[in-house]
Structure formats: C-alpha cells, structure tokens
Amino acid sequence: MTARFGPHQRLRNRSGFEAVYASRRSRRVGPLLVFVRRGGGGIGPRFGVSLPKRVGNAVMRNRIRRCLREAFRLQQGEWPGGADVVVNVRPHHPLGTQDYAALLREARQALLGQMS
C-alpha cells in the first residue's frame, strides 16, 4: 500500500503554524527545529515546512522542501493521528531524504516522550 501525502495533510496557513508554535513543544535536531502539537481529532498527522531565504536560492529551498515532505510521507504512520508538525530549517547543505527521515525520527522519539 502506498502512503499518500495529499493537500489535506499539509499545514498551509498562518493560523495553523501559529497554533503549533504556541504549543511550545520543540526539538532541535541538526539543521532542523521541529515543533509538534496534538491536533484536534484529525485522521492523520499534518505537516508544514518553514524555509527562510537565507537557506539558499529557490532551487535549493524547493529541493529541501521536497526531501522533507518525502521523508515525512514515508514515516507518517509512525506519528500519532491528529498531530501537527512544523519544521523550521536553518541554513545548511541539502541532505538526502534518508538523512532527513533520520532527523525527523529522532525528533519524533524525543517529542512523543514529552507528550505522554
């Protein structure tokens, strides 16, 4: 079965991002700062990415965004249902999808321990 990552699984507006930031649950892993909030009864986790221009040019930012989304898509079943996740990216050389997946896994394990 293929795990899909549709538009309903993305955080796209300011209020969604601010709600996650307001929860104040975060973990820094490598060049990523991962914020998590227990959502309001959604079917699956939702994901958002924040990349400032200082990370690189548009090509680099889009590559990082695609790799992060793919890493999240591959492990979305491991995140609790209804969780909202926002990743803030700091300047770095782009990593591969597997490297981002490892960073997200580390953040999830640390943050889920806090949320219990």
Image (cartoon, rainbow, N blue to C red):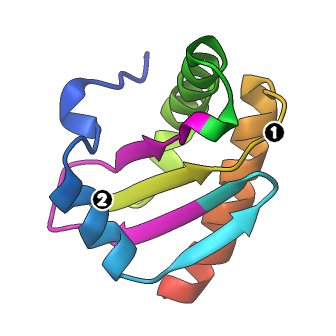
Q: Residues within 10 Å of mark 2 (few under 14, many from 20)?
A: many
Find disc 2 in the rendering and name its residue: 17
- The three-letter amino acid code for the residue at tag 2 is Phe
Residue at x 44%, y 55% (from the top left corner): 86
Q: Choose between 61 and 101: the one closer to the eye.
A: 61
Q: Which residue is mark 1?
A: 92
User: Considering depth in this image, is 75 or 93 the residue closer to the camera?
Assistant: 93
Residue 36 lies in what quarter of the image?
A: bottom left
Kind of residue at badge 1 = His
Determine whether, in the image, residue 54 is placed left or right of residue 76: right
In front of the other: 104 or 11: 11
Nearer to us of marks 1 and 2 is 1
Residue at 54% from the left image edge and 42% from the top image edge: 52
Residue 17: % across, % down: 30, 59
Q: Does residue 18 show up magenta in the picture?
A: no
Count residues near mark 1 (Cα–Cα under 10 Å), then give few for <14, some for 14-19, many for 20+.
Answer: some
Expressed as whole percent of the image width and height from the top left, the position of residue 73 reads: 49, 31
Mark 1 or mark 2: whose residue is earlier in sequence: 2
Left or right of 74? Residue 60 is right
Q: Start and end of the magenta stretch?
A: 34-53
Where does residue 78 sit, x and y in percent of width and height?
53, 51
Distance between the Cα atoms at labels 1 and 2?
22 Å
Q: Is residue 18 above or below residue 23?
A: above
Name the residue: 63% across, 19% down: 57
Label 1, secondary structure: give it.
loop
